[in-house]
Image (tube, grey):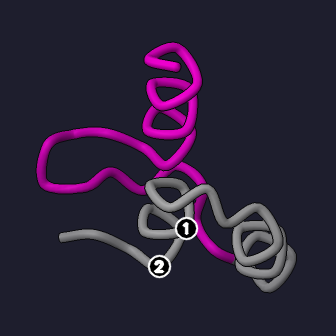
Amino acid sequence: MQTPLHHAARHNSIETAELLISNGANINEKDKYGQTALYIAVEKILKN
């Protein structure tokens, strides 16, 4: 499962991520691969 926060991280949508977090999104929730949104965001940064 991918949460809206995971989707925002995958698509570099910082404003959306901030909105989701400020409204209570669980930053520790993992997707079906065991990855958090933070992991996804960092992985994208390191690949560039």
Three-letter code for the amino acid on which mark 2 is drawn: Pro
Magenta-span inclusion, residue 47: yes
Whole-percent x and y of residue 28? 52, 49
The disc at residue 8 is 1
Three-letter code for the amino acid on which mark 1 is drawn: Ala
Read off the residue under disc 2: 4
Q: Residue at x 47, y 79 (%)?
A: 4
Q: Is residue 2 above or below residue 20?
A: above
Badge nearest the viewer, 1 or 2: 1
Q: Nearer the viewer, residue 47 or 3?
A: 47
Whole-percent x and y of residue 27? 60, 55
Splitting the image into 4 quarters, where does residue 38 fall?
top right
Splitting the image into 4 quarters, where does residue 34 fall?
top left
Graded by Cα atoms within 10 Å as few (under 14), some (14 to 19) or many (20 or more), the crowding at tag 2 reads some
Q: Residue at x 76, y 61 (%)?
A: 14
Q: Nearer the viewer, residue 1 or 40?
A: 40
Count of numbered badges drawn on the protein = 2
Q: Residue at x 44, y 39 (%)?
A: 40
The disc at residue 44 is none
Q: Nearer the viewer, residue 16 or 11?
A: 11
Q: Secondary structure at mark 1?
A: helix
Q: Is residue 19 left or right of residue 27?
A: right
Q: Residue at x 81, y 80 (%)?
A: 19
Whole-percent x and y of residue 45? 58, 24
Residue most extreme to the top: 46
Residue most extreme to the bottom: 23
Q: Is residue 32 left or right of residue 6?
A: left
Dot 1 and dot 2 residues touching (CB under 8 Å): yes
Q: Quadrant of the N terminus?
A: bottom left
Q: State the extent of the magenta-drawn residues as a range.
A: 25-48
Give the CA distance from mark 1 to mark 2: 6 Å
